[in-house]
Amino acid sequence: MSAAEANEVNQKYSIALQVKTQYYAILAARESEAAAQAQLSQAECETELRARQIDFIRETAGPVLAPVRLTGPLHGVVFRSDASDKARATSPYEIVDCRLVLALDDFAAILNRHDIVEVRHYSMYRPPKPLVDGEIGKRHPGALAIDAGRFYDRSGGELDVNRDFHGAIGAKTCGEGAAPNPATDAAGATRPSRSAPRSAARRAGRASA
């Protein structure tokens, strides 16, 4: 290998190292931000919701540290269950910890760039049984997790996680080393669906960031 070739290889490795270093620095910063959000008190978290102009009401749920109920979209994206609007107003499955709302708000900003206007979930809060007084729950019992089932875009097209996601239990879904599994014949890109709510397109028109 000539000196010129060696220099070219060295430059390529140097650039690759710089890119990876910057990537992991950004990743660490995001993880630090997420960790900081997780430590917020109820009052601090709700203050951040108001600063982001997120519509919500405070709720009551024993095992949830900072329970709220969303009353509007996040960056133009509605997060909701399949229950009717009347039932949703009192459904425990629509209760969410304020700190998860902050994470969903960041997620919604990404979804909005891909024209997603609605996310249908199976639940966020699942009241634990038995309920232990004073114990703060984790994951669903603490309203800190969401089971997102379907994503609707502005045209009413639907992405169904059960149908269109080709991951496997234990498989890595993101980051270095992640790779999609082969798609099935039934899967594809965003598609129209008879089950897609007709109101999705209308919501897109009136939802605002």
Image: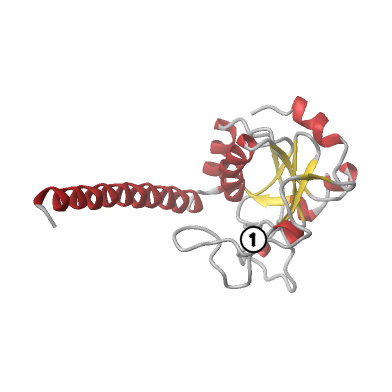
What is the x, y in percent for residue 3? 9, 51
Q: Nearer the viewer, residue 102 or 159?
A: 159
Question: In the rendered structure, which amino acid carries the disc numbered 1?
Answer: Gly
Q: Residue at the spot x=83%, y=47% of the render?
A: 88
Quarter of the picture containing the C terminus is top right
What percent of the width, then of the height, locates residue 23? 36, 49
Q: How many numbered discs, if any?
A: 1
Left or right of 140? Residue 4 is left
The outermost residue toward the front is 2
Q: SS for tag 1?
A: helix
Tell me, what colour scheme is on the image? secondary structure
Whether residue 205 sits left or right of residue 199 in the image: it is left
Q: How far across and how far down the image is residue 187, in percent?
A: 75, 57
Quick one: label 1, few (<14), some, or many (20+) residues within 10 Å?
Answer: many
- Residue 170 position by quadrant: bottom right
- Of 19 and 31, nearer the camera is 19
Q: Quadrant of the N terminus?
A: bottom left
85 lies left or right of 98: right
Residue 56: percent from the left, percent from the top? 69, 38
Q: Is residue 61 above or below residue 110?
A: below
Give the vertical position of 120 relative to 129 (above or below). above
Disc 1: which residue: 142
Residue located 56% across and 42% down the image: 106
**Residue nearest the viewer, comparing 11 with 54:** 11
Q: Is residue 26 above or below residue 133?
A: above
